[in-house]
């Protein structure tokens, strides 16, 4: 089977996806460091955090704290900003839309934060049923909120979308499972809710469920379960991958804090365990955010066995994804030649079925091709690409089974 010009045009038109700040296309672990400053919010648990430009705004922790601080990751400094006196507790939903920050308070009051004037403006109230500690994510200029606790062990499923362009809310398709106290995030124009707690009767049940929301057709899709069941984690997104860590897991039936850190790639629906967060003394109900292709996690509750604990965890850790990803990580039976290439490569897949995805050095996907078990040799013309280093990733049954560096010389 040949990758002829017509097929190339089809892929260029429909299959080329542009991912900014995407790293580690293979199996790099990335690295952690602890930033020097510590949080100065009045209570570092259950904060809202939202990225606006290159700054992060954090505050409104538990016990109805009204602090609102700006954190600058470059200078590693904190600056006090205007407080919000409305009631916002328990990880309130927050969005960054069109350069403004938004916080949905406990009473369904929505407030807009203007970084230029350092002021808060009341916007349209959410008309729906949104429980405590819901999931939330933004897609384009729309903020979405779903789930949350409304009575003991009962959770809402309603999904409400806020349109920042006309200051209105609209109800969308209900989330399939009424969960809460998990993580929401968006990747490539779709929303995801993961982890948290399910409806339960007598014993709290942590969740490893993952659901994808597609705003184009207003539908939910069940994805592969996460590797563990986790309560109150935090997340950030870099490129086309989400990174999730912190929170509580069950160990022999006991709630235990976890430093395990995962990468989730929605397109392949694949979970990968990465280098752990460098402190076992922490946390649930913390924060996660990404700025300029670098991720951050911290704050939240802390482990009572940690000597530095005073009820909350004041530190933030910085995660830099692996950027090389250019090491051979192949399995027998998959070969690419000639390599280096002047424009055409041949790939022997050993009759394996899956998908081959080609990335450039920045991590941007530039080509993809489905492969079948009936064929084992594919001729691919890459002469239209610029000279440089590329990475071919082979995905089979949602698992990355091979990564191969390709050098294109012209």
Image: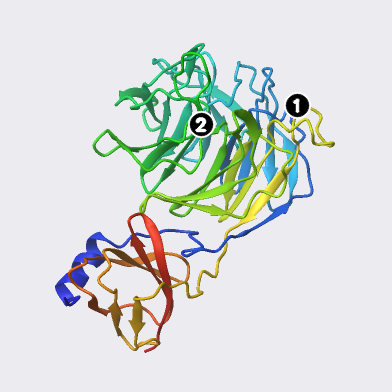
Compared to residue 2, the image places residue 52 above or below, namely above
Compared to residue 253, the image places residue 290 above or below, namely below
The residue sitting at 60% across, 49% down in the picture is: 54
Compared to residue 339, the image places residue 245 above or below, namely above
The residue sitting at 42% across, 18% down in the picture is: 126
Residue 123 image point, x, y percent: 47, 21
SS at badge 1:
loop
Q: Which residue is mark 2?
A: 182
Residue 157 image point, x, y percent: 38, 21
The 10 Å Cα crowd at callout 1, few under 14, some 14 to 19, many 20 or more, is some
Q: Nearer the viewer, mark 1 or mark 2?
A: 2
Image quarter hosting the C terminus: bottom left
Farthest-out residue, top: 151
Compared to residue 357, the image places residue 93 above or below, namely above
Which residue is at the front of the view, 95 or 62?
62
Distance from disc 1 to disc 2, alpha carbons, whole Å, reads 23 Å
Q: Which residue is mark 1?
A: 42
Farthest-out residue, right: 307
């Amino acid at each position: 089977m040949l990758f002829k010009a017509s097929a190339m045009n089809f892929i260029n038109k429909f299959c080329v996806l542009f991912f900014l700040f995407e790293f580690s296309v293979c199996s790099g672990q990335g690295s952690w460091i602890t930033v020097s400053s510590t949080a100065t919010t009045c209570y570092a648990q259950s904060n809202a955090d939202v990225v606006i430009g290159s700054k992060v705004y954090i505050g409104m922790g538990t016990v109805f704290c009204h602090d609102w601080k700006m954190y600058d990751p470059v200078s590693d400094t904190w600056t006090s900003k205007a407080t919000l006196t409305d009631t916002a507790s328990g990880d309130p939903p927050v969005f960054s839309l069109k350069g403004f920050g938004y916080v949905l308070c406990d009473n369904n009051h929505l407030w807009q934060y203007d970084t230029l004037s350092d002021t808060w403006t009341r916007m349209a109230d959410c008309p729906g049923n949104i429980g405590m500690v819901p999931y939330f994510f933004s897609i384009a200029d729309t903020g979405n909120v779903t789930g949350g606790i409304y009575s003991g062990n009962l959770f809402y499923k309603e999904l409400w979308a806020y349109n920042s362009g006309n200051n209105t809310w609209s109800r969308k398709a209900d989330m399939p499972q009424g969960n809460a106290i998990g993580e929401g995030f968006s990747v490539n124009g779709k929303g995801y809710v993961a982890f948290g707690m399910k409806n339960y009767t007598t014993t709290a049940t942590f969740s490893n469920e993952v659901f994808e929301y597609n705003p184009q057709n207003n539908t939910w899709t069940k994805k592969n379960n996460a590797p563990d069941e986790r309560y109150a984690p935090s997340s950030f997104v870099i490129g086309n991958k989400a990174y999730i860590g912190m929170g509580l897991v069950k160990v022999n039936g006991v709630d235990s804090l976890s430093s395990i850190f995962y990468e989730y790639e929605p397109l392949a629906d694949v979970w990968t365990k990465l280098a752990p967060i460098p402190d076992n003394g922490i946390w649930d109900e913390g924060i996660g955010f990404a700025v300029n292709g670098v991720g951050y996690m911290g704050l939240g509750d802390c482990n009572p066995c940690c000597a530095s604990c005073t009820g909350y965890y004041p530190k933030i850790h910085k995660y830099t994804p692996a950027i090389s990803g250019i090491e051979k990580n192949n399995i027998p039976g998959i070969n690419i030649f000639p390599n280096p290439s002047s424009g055409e490569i041949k790939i022997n897949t050993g009759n394996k079925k899956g998908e081959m995805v080609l990335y450039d050095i920045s991590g941007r996907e530039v080509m993809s091709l489905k492969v079948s078990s009936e064929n084992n040799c594919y001729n691919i013309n890459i002469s239209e690409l610029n000279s440089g280093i590329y990475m071919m990733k082979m995905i089979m049954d949602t698992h990355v089974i091979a990564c191969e560096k390709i050098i294109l010389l012209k």
